Image (spheres, helix red, strand yellow):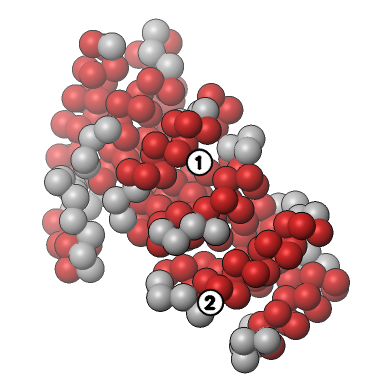
Amino acid sequence: MEDVNQIVKEIKQSFRQMMDGSVAQSMRDKGLNYHLNWGATLPRLREMAEEIAKSPKLTANSPYSLAIALWKENVRECKILATMLMPPDEMLPEVCDIWMEQVPSQEIAEQVAFNLWQHLPYAPQKAYQWIASEKEYEQLCGFHVLSRLFMNGQEPNERGINEFIDQALVALQGPFMSVRKAAMQSIIRFSELGLVYERLAKSALKSVNLELF
């Protein structure tokens, strides 16, 4: 485990070179408070994740162990890198639940949904579980994952359709702006699955006085 800790230490030191004070300050202004936030851009973090994945240092230490160690750091860039490095096929549902409980912000919720959650072998089950939650970040992740699954042509069964529409309508009338946006986006992606889905989406939205964009 010492090797993984050493890699984490080196990664954290490298963040100093990509520090963007204006980005970090902008995030603080929006209420995104991390213990440490270097303001590194997402494209740079993506490049970094690709470099780390190719590193010979990872031969003895799997990306899984490194992702677990990075996630434990209360540093914005570490958490985002963890979502990019974690192999989806190796992540157990129990570990997924722990990470979900520890999501600290909307940004991390969106990053983990797009970089990791949508690729999990059990992504649909988790997504339906999360959209039924009362927690903002769980709902947010659930609708983002379903949007991606719908975009990839995954059609829900009848039970899934009913559950999705019911929860989406609740979310659209709920207290969280981020969730309302994600729910509407997922309905749009749902409607793009075909004519029947489009009619279902329009009918559902009409029931709460909304229209499909």
Percent across and percent down for residue 19 are 17, 48
Give the residue displayed 52% in from the left and 71% down from the top. Answer: 171
Tell me which corner region of the image, top left, top right, bottom left or bottom right, holds residue 131: bottom right
**Outermost right residue:** 196
Spatial CA distance of label 1 from label 2 is: 25 Å
Q: Secondary structure at mark 2?
A: helix
Classify 32 as above or below 61: below
Give the residue displayed 62% in from the left and 91% down from the top. Answer: 209
Classify 99 as above or below 34: above
**Outermost bottom residue:** 209
Q: Is residue 197 left or right of residue 100?
A: right
Front: mark 1 or 2: 2
Q: Secondary structure at mark 1?
A: loop
Amino acid type at image mark 2: Leu
Say few, some or many: other residues with alpha carbon within 10 Å of mark 2 (under 14 / 14 to 19 / 20 or more). Answer: some
Give the residue displayed 42% in from the left and 10% down from the top. Answer: 59
Q: Which residue is mark 1?
A: 116
Viewer-closest of 146 and 125: 125
Amino acid type at image mark 1: Leu
Percent across and percent down for residue 18 are 21, 44
Q: Is residue 120 left or right of residue 64?
A: right
Percent across and percent down for residue 84 are 44, 38
On residue 14, which mark appears?
none
On residue 172, which mark appears?
2
Classify 143 as above or below 78: below
Percent across and percent down for residue 90 are 53, 24
Viewer-closest of 173 and 73: 173
Residue 50 appears in the picture as rendered: no
